[in-house]
Amino acid sequence: MQTFDVAIVGAGAAGLFCAGIAGQLGQKVLLIDHAEKVAEKIRISGGGRCNFTNRDATPANFLSENPHFCRSALARYSSQDFIALVQKHGIAFHEKHKGQLFCDDSAEQIIRMLLADCDAGGVTRWQPCAVQTVNAVSGGFELATSRGPVKATRVVVASGGLSIPKIGASDWGLRLAKQFGHAIVEPRAALVPLTFDAEAWAPFSALSGLSLPVQVSTGKGKAAGRFLEDLLFTHRGLSGPAILQISSFWTEGQSLQIDLAPDTELDERLREAKAQSRRQLGNELSELLPTRLAQAWLERLKIDGTRPMPECRDKDLQLLAEQLQRWSLAPNGSEGWRKAEVMRGGVDTRELSSQTMESKRVPGLHFIGEVVDVTGWLGGYNFQWAWASAAACARSLQGIATGSVANP
Ligand SMILES: Cc1cc2nc3c(=O)[nH]c(=O)nc-3n(C[C@H](O)[C@H](O)[C@H](O)COP(=O)(O)OP(=O)(O)OC[C@H]3O[C@@H](n4cnc5c(N)ncnc54)[C@H](O)[C@@H]3O)c2cc1C
C-alpha cells in the first residue's frame, strides 16, 4: 500500500494551492480528483479570465454562521500575497470593478501556475480517481480509491461546494464530514439568479435585457445585505451582480427592496419638474431612468405619461417615486445549483481550528475552500478564501515525517 504524509481530495482552487505549498514545504503529497480535468471552476471563472482575488478583501466580505472564523487565515494569507505570486509567475492582470482582479489573458494561466507549483513540490496527482471510503486508523487514515488503497497521516478535504454538478461538484466532502460527526450548516445555492412567479413576473418580462445600477437590500439586523450594483432584467426574473450578491443573503419568503434610481431623489426631482417644466411626465421620467423602465412603471401604476408636468397630480408623482425607489418584490426561488456560482453553508466552522483548518473532532482531518461554511461575496472573494484556507492548512502540515502512518 502506498503511503503519503497528506492525501488531498479535490484538485480545484484550494486543493491545488494546498498541495503545491505542502509539497514545497517537504510533505509527500497525494492529490486526488474524480474529474478528468483539474480546476474546472477556475477555467470557467470570471468569464474565462478568472477574477482570482479582490484587492480589498476583508472578513466583512464573507458570510458564515461563525463570521470571525475566516479572520486568521485571511490575515495570514492576504490578497496582496496572492497578487505577489501571480506577479512572480509573470501573469498580467487588470482591475475591473471595485478591486476585482482578472487575468488579462486567460484563467488557464492561474491553473498552469498552480500545477507548476505542484510539480515543484513533487506532488503525486491521481485523476480521474474516485475515493470510495476514508477510515481513521492508528496514526492516520486509510483511503480506498479506484486506483487502490492508500495510507496518509492526514487527509485534507478540498472537494468544493455543490454548484454546477455537471463539471464535477459533489456532496462527497459534506458526507465525509458527517461520517466523522461534523455538523453541517445547511447548504444553499448562492450568487445565483432569483426567479419569480410567472404570472407576477409577466408585466416585467418585456424589460428583458435591460440593465441599470440599483441599490438592493434584504434581511434584518446581522443577516441584512445591501449592495449598489448593476441589475439585469431577464425573461424569468432578475439577474446581474446586484441580484447575485443579494441572493447570498436572501431566504425563502423574504422580499427584496430595490431602489431603481439610487443616485436620485425622485420625489424632489418630480416636484421640481412639475413647477418648472411643461414637458410630458413620460419624457421627464425618461431623463431620470431608462425609457423602457419609465414606460413600464407608468403602465403598471396606470398613470398617464402623456400628461404635461404641471397637470400631474402630486399623489401620482409621489406614488411613482415611491414605487421606483422602494420597489418591493418577493422571489419564489432561485435558479439553483445549475446556475449558482457558490454554495452557502457547509462544514460548520465551530468544529474546525481557524489556524490550521483541522477538525477538532478528528485529529489529522482538515477542511479547506468552499466545502467550509465561509462564503464570499461576488468579486474574487471566493478564490481568496480558497487560497487563504489552503495556505493556513498547508503551512500547519510542516513537520510531519514521511511514513509516519502506523501499519495496523
Ligand atoms: C461559473 C462560476 C464562476 C466563478 N467565478 C469566480 C470568480 O471569478 N472569482 C471567484 O472568487 N470565485 C468564482 N467562482 C467560485 C469559485 O470557483 C469557487 O469558490 C472555488 O473554485 C472553490 O474552490 P474549491 O477548491 O473549494 O472548490 P473547487 O474549485 O470547486 O474544486 C473542487 C474539486 O473537487 C473535486 N471533487 C468534487 N467531488 C469529488 C469527489 N467525490 N472525489 C474527488 N474529487 C472531487 C472537483 O472535481 C473539483 O476539482 C465561480 C464559480 C462558478 C461556478
Image (cartoon, grey):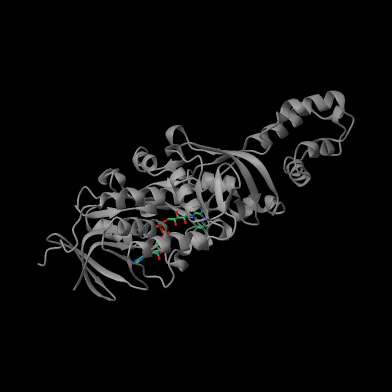
Where residue 152 appears, as percent x and y from the top left, is 21, 63
> Based on the displayed image, in which of its 4 quarters is residue 81 positioned?
top left
Residue 55 or 268: which is nearer the viewer?
A: 55
Q: Decide if residue 283 is in sight here.
A: yes
Quadrant observed for ligand 1 in the rendered image: bottom left
Of all residues, the one furthest to the right in this rendering is 278
Where residue 46 appears, as percent x and y from the top left, is 55, 56
How many numbered badges does the structure rendering display? 0
Q: Please, is residue 384 above or below residue 111 in the view?
A: above
From the viewer's perspective, tell me whether residue 45 is left or right of residue 238: left
Q: Please, is residue 222 above or below residue 55 in the view?
A: above
Q: Residue at x 43, y 42 (%)?
A: 62
Residue 255 or 90: which is nearer the viewer?
A: 90
Of all residues, the one furthest to the bottom in this rendering is 147
From the viewer's perspective, tell me whether residue 282 is left or right of residue 262: right
Q: Quadrant of the N terminus?
A: bottom left
Where residue 51 appears, as percent x and y from the top left, is 53, 52
From the viewer's perspective, tell me whether residue 32 is left or right of residue 339: left
Q: Decide if residue 304 is in sight here.
A: no
Where residue 193 appears, as percent x and y from the top left, is 55, 53
> Based on the displayed image, in which of its 4 quarters is residue 77 positioned?
top left
From the viewer's perspective, tell me whether residue 407 is left or right of residue 286: left
Q: Residue at x 58, y 48 (%)?
A: 241
Q: Quadrant of the C terminus?
A: bottom left
Q: Residue at x 45, y 51 (%)?
A: 85
